[in-house]
Amino acid sequence: MGFEEATPIQTATIPTALEGKDIIGQAQTGTGKTGAFGIPLVNRINTEEAHVQALILAPTRELANQVAESLVTFGKHKGVRTVVVYGGQDMRKQITDLKRKPHVVVATPGRLMDHMRRKTIRLQQVEMVVLDEADEMLNMGFIEDIETILKEVPNERQTLLFSATMPKRIEKLAQTFMKNPETIAVKSAEVTMENIEQGYVEVHEKEKFDVLSRMIDIHTPELAIVFGRTKRRVDELAEALGKRGYRAEGIHGDLNQAKRDSVLRKFKSGLIDVLVATDVAARGLDISGVTHVYNFDLPQDPESYVHRIGRTGRAGKSGVAVTFATPREMDHVKAIEQLSKKKMTKLKKPTHTEAMEGQQQLVLEQLKELIGNGDADSYRVAAKDLLQETDATTALAAALKLLTKEPDTTPVRLTAEAPLRVKKRQGSGGGSGSGKPYRGGGRQRDDRRRSQYRKDDRSTGGGRRPSNASGPRPGGSQRSKPSKHA
Ligand SMILES: Nc1ncnc2c1ncn2[C@@H]1O[C@H](COP(=O)(O)OP(=O)(O)OP(=O)(O)O)[C@@H](O)[C@H]1O
Ligand SMILES: [Mg+2]
């Protein structure tokens, strides 16, 4: 895989995991937690025995898929068979896969329960269980499902819990499900990655979209993720970005799995360069080339912020995260800063002129690159002809105008979102230990978050078409980019 040395969390957990101990593992986003559990897990598989020996649970389908891909890679040379099962996919194919006696099963809780009910999976010989993004599975209300699942798994198993954030209530879960777990936290001064430049901009709801467009024009991201609060918001944003000439598509839980897969594939391959997402894409996803994350709407809680912005700045790369907050939401910005232990830089709303300059700069860079590798020789005759008629500056200025995607101000309509409310802390032992406003403790809160998710994640767009925003901008050129997508 081209790894040269273990990352700190891998160094810290692999030996302990190999001893068979239970582990609660915490390390910043993008620092190789998948390897921290996946490598020792693969090592402990006995390929002579054809039954499920390890079970990995993940909160979302896309993450389950990605983790399974990593496990396949880790276990390739040893002959470890890994199967992934998640909702929204053909049951029969999964049943056939499971009949092939995999050693490792990666699953989302809901679909795994379906297979348990149908008796198409046997967990009686599972020796290792991993809960990736354990805290999110609690947030999503998967707790009962996990209880049910773990009842099927022998008690003598090894249990591993991983996440970049470990709210206090995970301890409760640990007491129930784990045996003397060792907490291994690779803590640095900050919860978020140092190599992510973090800024916020104070904007009124109705200015948000222009500010976003301008920022994208100025930053010229390679790949960007824009997080919106609701499914409807994501649909509307993707469509609006499309109208302004950006290659953007949305992903959220109301789309069918084929669509979710295709959007993600297009994003990974650079066919689209802006992914608009609900929190379904906030956790664990490892997509190289994501240089910018925009929180168009504030995340529901500070932990979610940590994960969202962690989609950039992974594996030693740098990244930029910008969070939009309306004047009434400024308290949330402070709460986030308290959890992340890092101040965000206050950013100014960019102007139209700055956006224009950003786009010009992009074209100039591309031009210089082309001059550098002399790839334009076949245009020399035409260039000389042109220079018979006009001076060089005029000719070049015209060419620049033609190439530059001038900031697009096509009017768009977004349904306004209400400001994020401050949730009161309930009871004790809640939150992340940061003592900050939202998210109380215990089960009640989990259920609330669950219903909130369901409500929020339901499209209320009233028959709005799913956005198909990847086409060229009306009457204009495709967005141009400096890198591979030029
Ligand atoms: N030892 C290593 N050397 C170099 N790169 C590594 C190493 N281990 C993992 N990586 C790479 O680092 C990237 C991030 O890894 P991974 O997805 O496991 O992070 P994570 O800690 O689980 O992040 P998150 O909290 O967002 O889930 C991946 O692209 C992975 O291939
Ligand atoms: Mg991960």
Image (cartoon, helix red, strand yellow):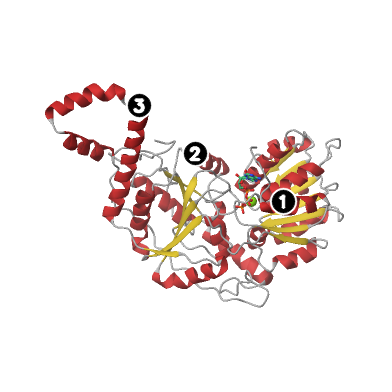
Which of labels 2 and 3 is toward the front? Answer: 3
Q: Which element carries disc 1, helix, strand or loop?
A: helix
Q: How far apart are marks 3 and 1 (CA)?
A: 47 Å
Residue 98 seen:
yes
Instruction: Look at label 3 and name its amino acid.
Output: Asp
Location of residue 86 with respect to 350 vertically, above or below: above
Location of residue 215 with respect to 119 vertically, above or below: below
Q: Which element carries disc 3, helix, strand or loop?
A: loop
Q: Quadrant of residue 430?
A: bottom right
x 49%, y 41%: residue: 267
x 78%, y 36%: residue: 99
Instruction: Look at label 2 and name its amino acid.
Output: Lys
**Whether label 1 touches label 2, CB < 8 Å:** no
Packing grade of label 1 (10 A; few <14, some 14-19, many >=20) is few
Q: Residue tagged by mark 1?
A: 11
- Spot occupied by residue 43 in the image (x, y as percentages of width and height): 79, 42
Looking at the image, which is closer to me, 229 or 72?
72
Q: Residue tagged by mark 2?
A: 266
The label shown at residue 375 is 3
- Spot occupied by residue 478 in the image (x, y as percentages of width and height): 34, 38
Q: Quadrant of the C terminus?
A: top left
Q: In which quarter of the image is the N terminus?
A: top right
